[in-house]
């Protein structure tokens, strides 16, 4: 498994892309198309927010046949809370893309990200589809990575190579994140291309596993968006023997997919709105997996812990305080809390009391918080970002 | 029921108080004592955080006899996550106060607020108890209101008068809040004095009702502290016929208590760390009370909604997006969302689209968000504050 230098979603065989500025944003690319030259096996994971954007609703339907060949994406407008008109708008875009590419509409997926509660500027999008398709190429992935960004400060893409039955298989992804990233992946889009030959059912479970151990382990601000989407297209052009069951080849492929997703998830945290530091919260020896997760998120989503890290403020007492809020089984006298592997709290009392040492620990770019509950066998790790005044500024300003 | 001009915790008959600077904080009052000249019926409500501070553990035990006569309070140090030593320190303080006042230790309650994970400067406190007691008076409530503050910018106190069986009954409270205020009342201290004559069992239920409709309906940052405490002392000096059951007199008294607690809860929100606006979130027609609460808190605790209000940013789409996260029953097409009583979203589509009108609505000092779920009969209202860069600054700085 090796990451490719300057790898991107066109690194796997048979994928083209293009992006342009259709005018949703001012003078910035905001419309992109990802296309496989042959029909691909496809799977998706979507937001669990009860309010879902129109494109999410359409994709969930279309993916019932585990197949797709193109993904049309816009940034700057989420097409969410836009009712029947928003749904019809998304359908219309899909139909036009499908017609121009000579595909069935169900094989064209759609994603949107941006402001909620505004209708799409439909004509701006439709008028630009012919040019978008005409310009599809094998060397335009950088443009697409830019076009899907909202408040991201840099594009996020990566490709890796593995061998399956002696065949080279390449898998790549492009993602955008920035705000609202939470347990169930919020305002997060990720499109994965692979030339692996794999069956629909198995691809679905590989994607679910990978997302669970990556995008579902990150949180920026505890918010879950209406538009979160992870889609994978597997066109089989690597001509490896088709992966049909959960054997060795499945595990190799899934491990690569997990690695890819986790790297992108971490890039999203690194580039979280206003973030200056990454925070890794690891819970060990919890009573159950569910409780380990609850505990990790209670700490990772605590505004007080996040501002503590931002300010390099050694008030580590905010960690047990937020842990106590998690509504899980715990025994105060069994808990051990470490900051950067140095124990700060054990046997229900403070251990590391030297302010200057504590401040020095927090000066690092990544802050690791380890909480050993010592009452069970379950672990969970999540990643989040610190909370800064810049986060507030970004989200208070009107876009 | 009328609020008293400059009413405070010594307005009810028979209550004295005093406060001084013992040196936990630099040159600010940080130690206070509240004292009833006769033994009082007492009740308390405490944090539901699984990690509880030593004073909370002691009070829960002491209040088993529904009786108390004094409350000793310090600010600047929470005496939490301090293990056996912290517990012994709190016990020692209680013993010394009790001895000096000639009371049984179980009739002296204790509360602390401030930094977590540090031992109390025990001697500073003990050495000042004699002076604190010597100075007890009927005109020192303002000092006490200051002494319990941490990041509050102004003292919070109020007294009201009611008539019970023709007798004048006065009830008063002093509170501190500022950060971490959440569903279950966080880093919030409130001490209530009343000269009502009421039985212990009935007082307990009156307090529970009042807290549920006030302090448990506010949230600053979704954080629940380890030290939250509401204590009421009822010394009976108003000589009204003792309230022993939940009849008319109980209802009058409880209504007054609720009013008092709600006013103080709102002061806490108004004075929340860095807050510039109050946000009222009302959910109506939910499937259950629990779901109404969940929905209200999902919106009230959303960093995106709070920054939207702070920035007078008309992105109201963040309201349905955070509502969708609440994991409750909802039907998108039935939801109606209003800002300042103007409908912005109905029938699953945007209604009020004029940016300037939306911005004007958000310019008010209090922003009301009403969400009609239209699928049931249950309502709930919560109050919160906006999220500003100042909140981050306060919490990032090392105290």
Image (cartoon, coloured by chain):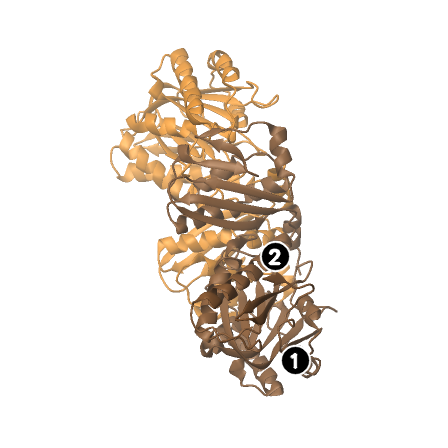
Chain colours: A brown, B orange
Residue situated in front as seen by the camera: A314 or A341: A341
Residue at screen point 33% across, 25% down: B62
**Farthest front residue in view:** A166
Residue situated in front as seen by the camera: A199 or A2: A2
Q: Where is residue A229 shown, x and y percent of the image?
A: 54, 67
- Counting the numbered discs, the total is 2
Q: Are tags 1 and 2 found on a single chain? A: yes
Please, which chain is the residue tagged with disc 2 on? A
Q: Quadrant of residue A309?
A: top right
Residue A162 marker: none
Residue B154 visible in image? yes
Q: Where is residue B340 shown, x and y percent of the image?
A: 54, 57
Q: Where is residue B108 shown, x and y percent of the image?
A: 38, 21
Residue highlighted by disc 1? A123
Residue at screen point 64% across, 34% down: A360
Residue highlighted by disc 2? A268
Q: Would you say A310 lies left or right of B115 here?
A: right
């Amino acid at each position: 498994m090796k990451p490719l230098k300057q790898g991107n979603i066109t690194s796997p065989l048979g994928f083209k892309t293009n992006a342009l500025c259709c005018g949703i944003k001012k003078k910035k690319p905001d419309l992109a198309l990802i296309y496989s030259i042959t029909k691909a096996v496809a799977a998706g994971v979507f937001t669990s927010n009860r309010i879902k954007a129109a494109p999410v609703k359409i994709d969930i339907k279309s993916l019932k046949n585990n197949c797709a060949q193109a993904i049309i994406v816009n940034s700057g407008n989420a097409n969410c809370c836009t009712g029947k008109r928003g749904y019809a708008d998304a359908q219309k875009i899909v139909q036009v893309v499908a017609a121009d590419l000579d595909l069935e509409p169900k094989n064209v997926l759609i994603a949107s990200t941006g402001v909620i509660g505004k209708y799409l500027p439909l004509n701006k999008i439709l008028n630009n589809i012919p040019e978008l398709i005409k310009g599809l190429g094998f060397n335009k992935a950088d443009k697409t990575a830019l076009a899907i960004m909202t408040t991201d400060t840099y594009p996020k893409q990566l490709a890796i190579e593995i061998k399956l039955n002696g065949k080279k298989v390449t898998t790549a992804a492009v993602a955008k994140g920035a705000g609202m990233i939470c347990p169930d992946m919020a305002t997060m889009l990720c499109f994965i291309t692979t030339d692996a030959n794999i069956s629909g059912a198995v691809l679905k479970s590989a994607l679910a596993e990978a997302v669970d151990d990556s995008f579902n382990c990150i949180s920026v601000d505890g918010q879950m968006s209406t538009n979160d989407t992870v889609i994978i297209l597997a066109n089989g052009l690597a001509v490896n023997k088709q992966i049909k069951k959960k054997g060795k080849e499945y595990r190799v492929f899934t491990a690569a997919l997990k690695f890819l997703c986790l790297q992108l998830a971490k890039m999203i945290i690194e580039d979280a709105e206003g973030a200056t530091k990454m925070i890794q919260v690891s819970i060990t020896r919890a009573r159950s997996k569910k409780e380990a997760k609850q505990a990790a998120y209670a700490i990772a989503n605590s505004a007080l812990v996040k501002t503590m890290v931002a300010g390099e403020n050694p008030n580590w007492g905010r960690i047990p305080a937020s842990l106590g809020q998690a509504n899980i089984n715990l025994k105060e006298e069994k808990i051990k809390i470490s900051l950067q592997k140095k124990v700060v709290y054990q046997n229900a009392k403070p251990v590391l009391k030297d302010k200057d040492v504590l401040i020095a620990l927090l000066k690092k770019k990544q802050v690791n918080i380890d909480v050993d509950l010592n009452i069970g066998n379950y672990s969970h790790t999540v990643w989040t970002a610190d909370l800064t005044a810049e986060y507030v500024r970004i989200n208070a300003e009107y876009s």
